[in-house]
Amino acid sequence: MNVKKLYKGIDIFKLVAALGVVTIHTGIKFFDILGRLGVPFFVIVSSFFFFKHYFRLNNSIQRKNYIKKFLVRLGLLFLTWEVFYIPFAIIKFMMINNGTITIKSVLLYIFDFFYPVPSNANGWGPSWYLIAMFMALPIFIGVFYLLRKNLIILGILCVIIEFYFICANGYGYLTHWSTLGTYGFPRVMIYIYIGMLLAKFKDKINDYSFKRYLGIFGALLVLFLIENFVIKMSGGVINSEEVFTTAPTALVGSLVAIRWQPNVANTVNIRNFSTFLYCAQQWGLVVWDKFTHVLNINFLGINVLEFVFIVISSYMFYLLYKWIKAKTQWKFWSYMV
């Protein structure tokens, strides 16, 4: 009998990554730098699990059906949460149209809806990751087969794309390249590639001890922070989207998460809350912004209070969500995590 392997370390890392994304949006200094590793980690582990199963399928029909299943699940996650962000989406629609609806304004809104950063047109900027994955995965697989499964050429292509985003973001103050696409599907290609490699060579992961992975991860974290601080000292942004050490650090961090088996009885709840927190945070950000604006509150440390407010309020709504889900048994609720 096959025993399903539990990845408790990944579940805990997912929560840390979600918290890291919240630190970016609340502007907590230092931690918002580390938070930039959150989305790369999400993409890597999602791709790892996808390809881990995908490579075991025997024929093209099974593989196509599995791709469809993955995309449907991702699409339902996005659409379910979009229901809760309709009020924000309507507000953005009115702002973009400025009272006059034209073909041009509608087309612009549709583009901004699926490319929500920085316009936030669909109501929640964090949705860019889900949309990017939805678009990137089938394109990535198509290119994979177009290149006749040549991992080297595919890797070179992904590295070239990543190099562009590094130059446009982390080193944009030097290159002045356009950042268009940073919140789109090309950005996540390198991380899908990394996740695929981890799945393809998963048996090799155990060749090194957990402590060795942890040591390398710690060293890369230090280099990641140093690179960001050097960029800041040189005139750039200290917590840019992509720098040279982002991908290597996210890669080894994922290896640590895969190998780590903490002594925790059940991490499913942690995994589900990490998804809920990532998707629900926009409501907390908007409510907090309105609250502080009306009361004209602004003091040192308010960013930390905002972070605490978003995490606690999201957890309270998560508990409410679990209660409603258990009471109603509606299929709709299962798509939210």
Image: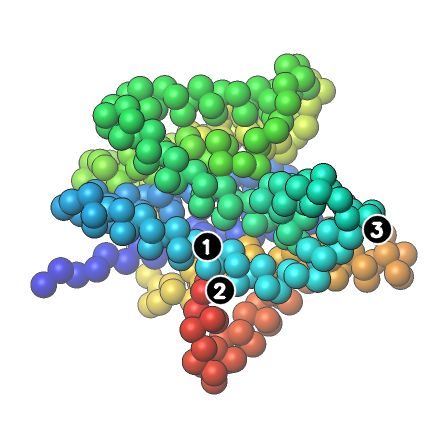
Percent x, y for residue 64? 27, 47
Give the position of the N terminus as an image quadrant. Answer: bottom left
Secondary structure category for the residue under label 1: helix
Q: Which labelled disc corresponds to residue 99?
A: 3
Q: Is residue 185 left or right of residue 88?
A: left
Query: At x 50% / y 32%, what residue is drawn?
Result: 187
Q: Does the rendering let one see residue 21?
A: no
The reply to whether residue 187 is visible in this rendering is yes
Q: Earlier in the sequence, mark 1 or mark 3?
A: 1
Task: State the residue position of label 1.
Answer: 75
Query: Mark number for residue 336?
Result: 2
The Cα atoms of the two marked residues, 2 and 3, are separated by: 33 Å
Q: Nearer the viewer, residue 290 or 238?
A: 290
Q: Residue at x 53, y 20 (%)?
A: 164
Inter-mark Cα distance, 1 to 2: 11 Å
Looking at the image, is mark 1 or mark 2 nearer the viewer?
1
Contact between marks 2 and 3 (CB within 8 A): the answer is no
Which dot, 2 or 3, sits closer to the camera? 3
Q: Nearer the viewer, residue 148 or 46?
A: 148
Q: Amino acid at mark 2?
A: Met
Q: Position of residue 208 (x, y in %)?
A: 24, 36
Side of 231 relative to 259 (left or right): right
Q: CA distance from mark 1 to mark 3?
A: 31 Å
> Within the image, what quadrant is residue 151 found in?
top left
Amino acid type of the residue that numbered disc 1 sits on in the rendered structure? Gly
Q: Which numbered mark, 1 or 3, is in the foreground of this view?
A: 3
Which residue is depicted at the point 54% across and 23% down?
166
| Residue 79, image x, y percentages | 52, 59
